[in-house]
Image (tube, rainbow, N blue to C red):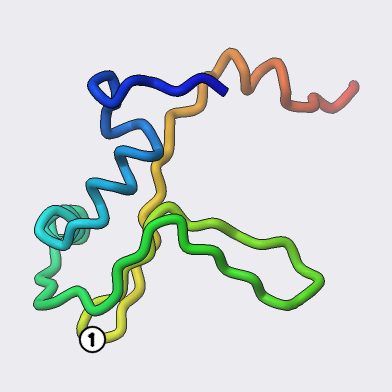
Amino acid sequence: MTRKPFEELTISDDFMFCKVMEHESLCRPFLEMLFSAQIEKITYLSSQNIITTNSGAKTVRLDVLVKDDIGTSYDIEMCFPIDVRVYRKTRVLPFG
């Protein structure tokens, strides 16, 4: 894997996205704008949070996990639009 120089990183890069969202002063207004809700305080903020349901299960890695003062949890994930050309190549079409 090649590493980009810091100057070339954008918000769509996983590292930069997580670093930006780690700051409550940026994360809280982002969530408020996204959900049209007022968040008084963020009580927990963690990037690359790993969740395991039991010892034999696969783990899930959340880009950013946030909890607010009233107990609401937010999982913030960086998503990219699906390229329709790739989708068409990979989906299975029924015969007939």
Residue 66: quarter of image: bottom left
The picture places residue 56, in percent across and down from the top left corner, at 81, 71
Above or below 33: residue 88: above
In this orientation, which residue lies closer to the viewer: 47 or 96? Answer: 47
Q: Is 95 on the left-hand or right-hand side of 74?
A: right
Q: Position of residue 23 (x, y in %)?
A: 18, 57
Q: What kind of element bears circle 1?
A: loop
Residue 93 versus residue 21 in the image, above or below:
above
Outermost residue on the right side: it is 96
Q: Residues within 10 Å of mark 1 (few under 14, many from 20)?
A: few
Residue appearing at x 67%, y 75% in the figure? 53
Numbered marks: total: 1
Q: Nearer the viewer, residue 77 or 20?
A: 20
For badge 1, the amino acid type reads Ile
Residue in view at x 28 percent, y 47 percent: 19
* Residue on which disc 1 sits: 70
Q: Where's the N terminus, which quadrant?
A: top right
Q: Which residue is rendered at x = 45% and y = 23% of the image?
A: 3
Nearest to the observer: residue 83 or residue 45: 45
User: Residue 92, image x and y in percent?
Assistant: 79, 27
Spot the residue most to the bottom.
70
Residue 39 lies, with reference to residue 65, above or below; the image says below
Of residues 1 and 58, the one nearer the viewer is 1
Residue 87 at what x, y percent from top left?
Answer: 63, 23
In the image, is 12 to the left or to the right of 38?
right
The C terminus: image quadrant: top right
Tell me: 74 left or right of 1: left
